[in-house]
Amino acid sequence: MKLNRKSIRFKIPFYLFVFVIVMLLLLWIMEIFLLDSIYKSIKTDAILNAGNYISDNITNPDIGEYINQLAITNDVCIAVADENGTPIYWSSSFSQCVREITTTNRFMERISLAYQNDNTYVQEVQTTEYIEDIKLDIPISIRSYNEIQYTHIIEGASNYYLFMNSTISPINATVDTLKTILTIVTISMSIIAILLGLYISRKIIAPIRQLNTSAKKLGKEDVHFSGKGYLEIEELSSTLNQANKDLHQVEKLRNELISNISHDLRTPLTMISGYAEMMRDLPDENNEENLNVIINETKYLSRLVNDVLDLSKLQAGAQKLEEKRFDLTQMLLDMIERVRSLSDIQIDFIYDKHFDVIADEMKISQVFYNILNNAIHYTKDKVIVRQILKKDTIRIEIQDFGEGIEESEIDKIWQCYYRSANHSRQISGSGLGLYICKQILDLHHATYGVTSRLHEGSTFYFELNMKKDVASS
């Protein structure tokens, strides 16, 4: 099977391989190319620290013992001379540094360099060791090597001259050894990185493939997602299971909506058709009462179609607010009076005085009408509307005295396509009213909700912001 570069099976081994190569490259740079510089820097720092310690403790009676310990610890030879150039302290390994003190020219050269550099001078020099050929009476070179030479003038009542020499060991053999080791490590780690990446990607991709296979069936049949092994996969499985459940629930509610709307359309159409035919065939039936039936059923159909259109506009985000200042109380009075003329249910309106709000009057009247109409459909004998002032908001409550709403259904009644279990076919309506109310109130950033008790009724409410200085009597 061809490996896709966008696939996890390719990316995980690739990124792991790149990570290993970058880390090994840094190791090569540090160990091979910077090893000499790092080694010399460490040696120099050790000498400087030892020099500072000796300078601070030069008058200590135990300085000789300290010098020997520092020489062993830092692998240096140390010598201290007085103002006359006479060695007074030196490490047990009598070496080049002490011989240089006894060589007048070299002694003066190092002291001069120290004076020129603020009493301290560190340099790297190449040194050659010689031995005397007894027969020929001439020096013979044994070996050449590099060393770090440290010269420091300790100023005080009497000046002291501190000399330290430390051999820099050749690291060529070490570098060659490290190259061989790093080559083996690089090849080994590259192979391990690729194999490990393939293994990890295979472990990760297996549950993802399983989820993908199940997800392709989503919406077509009832599937269950069971990804295991990783927290994220389990969370994704849980989310997909919930999505599957919600999708089937929406499908079920949509089918119910279609069934309900079909029923709600069929009933008024049947009545309109029946009354129209009766009025056509029976001249005596051509009266105002039958015309009112046709008109009322036509209005119902118009309201049903408008609900469906409003739903589509709200879901598409096409609804715009046209906010203006208007008398909320008067709008409620007018709406209640109009509904009273079409219903036998008693509607009581409790309020203190008129208040203005800034909102979309048409949409707020639609919210109030939908909730009031819903209350009339479900109440037993009456509906109470209350207008309550709460600081900077006006709260509108619509209370009915019907069967109430199950506690488990309260959060669902605002959902699209949802109908309460207490709904009956005898109660007309599209079932979209509360969802439309929710969308309009959300556009206004209004607070809304419902409280309900079974067999006692429900109270729907919404709150609109207002300013205290806009109240009118």
Image (tube, grey):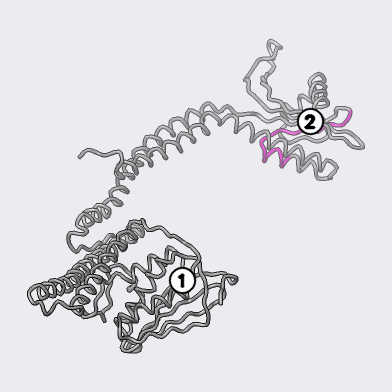
Q: Label 1's element?
A: strand
- In the displayed structure, would residue 130 be above or below residue 32? above
Which disc, if any, is residue 120? Answer: 2
Q: Nearer the viewer, residue 68 or 18?
A: 18
- State if disc 2 and disc 1 touch (CB < 8 Å): no
Question: In this rendering, which labeled residue sits more in front, label 1 or label 2?
Answer: 1
Residue 464 pos. (x, y %): 48, 70
Residue 48 pos. (x, y %): 72, 36
Residue 117 pos. (x, y %): 80, 27
- In the displayed structure, would residue 429 be above or below residue 108? below
Say which quarter of the image contains residue 214.
bottom left
Q: Nearer the viewer, residue 309 or 110?
A: 309
Do we see residue 229 in this rendering?
A: no
Which residue is painted at 25% across and 67% down in the image? 302
Point out the stretch of residues depicted in magenta: 68-83
Which residue is painted at 36% across and 74% down in the image? 369
Is the N terminus in the top left, top right, bottom left or bottom right quadrant? Answer: top left
- 231 in magenta: no
Residue 239 pos. (x, y %): 32, 62
Does 3 sit left or right of 125 as displayed?
left
Say which quarter of the image contains residue 94.
top right
Q: Amino acid at mark 2?
A: Thr
Which disc, if any, is residue 447? Answer: 1
- In the displayed structure, would residue 364 be above or below residue 188? below
Q: Label 2's element?
A: strand
Q: Residue furthest right?
A: 157
